[in-house]
Amino acid sequence: MKLTSKVADLFCESKERRLFNAQLESKYERLYRLAYAWSHQPALAQDLVQETMLKAIEKRKKLDSLEHLDAWLTKIMHNLFLDNMRHKRRWEFAEESEIDLHYTVECNETQLIKSQTNQAFYQAMAKLSLEQRQAISLSDLQGFSYQEISEITSTPIGTVMSRLSRGREKLKQLLQSHELQQHKVVPLRRK
């Protein structure tokens, strides 16, 4: 029995849709880490990723190849993030005490050290400008090339390189300062 061209097209589209959805699902955690690096708010990061997924499903016909899926999704999320910021007119970060640190386990020293290191890193990242945070998270945490970052953020490559250089230097200084504060020796008082 021979399938009509319409039925064959629907079958192919369904197969393509399943492949696309599977690829999309595999990107959720990576997108969440990136959204959290940008916003430092778990709920906002989750919302941002879900909006990105919905937008990607709506616009999937515009994706020319699945090999460009990472950059395409990141571009969508970047635009949604900027729209969110424009809508609110100002960006408010949660206080440290409000951040729920689900990933710490009190009785395990190794996990505590990792948690403190992560917290110091995220606190240092939060002190960078948004542009520097985006450049560092896209390059160093997600592995995008300068060209891809340029396209995602609609910024010239030279500006991307400058933001990375300045952001990395400031991040290094902030982490070194944090390390010094952690190991600060308090002098004993003489009687």
Image (cartoon, grey):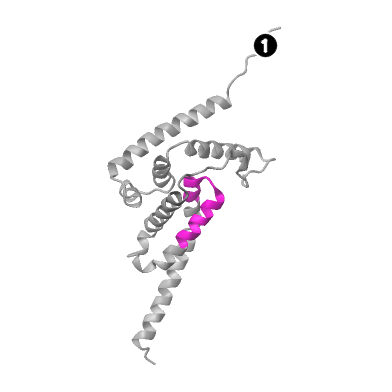
Q: Main secondary structure of the magenta part?
A: helix
Is 18 placed left or right of 146 in the picture?
right
| Residue 7: x %, y % from top left | 39, 85
Nearer to me, 189 or 145 = 189
| Circle 1 residues within 10 Å: few <14, some 14–19, many ≥20 | few
Name the image quarter holding residue 62.
bottom left
Magenta-colored span: 33-53
Residue displayed at 41% across by 43% down = 140
User: Quadrant of the image for the N terminus?
Assistant: bottom left
Residue with the mark numbered 1: 189
Q: Is residue 179 above or below residue 162?
A: above
Nearer to me, 19 or 190 = 190
Residue displayed at 36% across by 85% down = 6
Residue displayed at 62% across by 43% down = 98
Amino acid type, mark 1 = Arg
Q: Is residue 118 above or below residue 3?
A: above
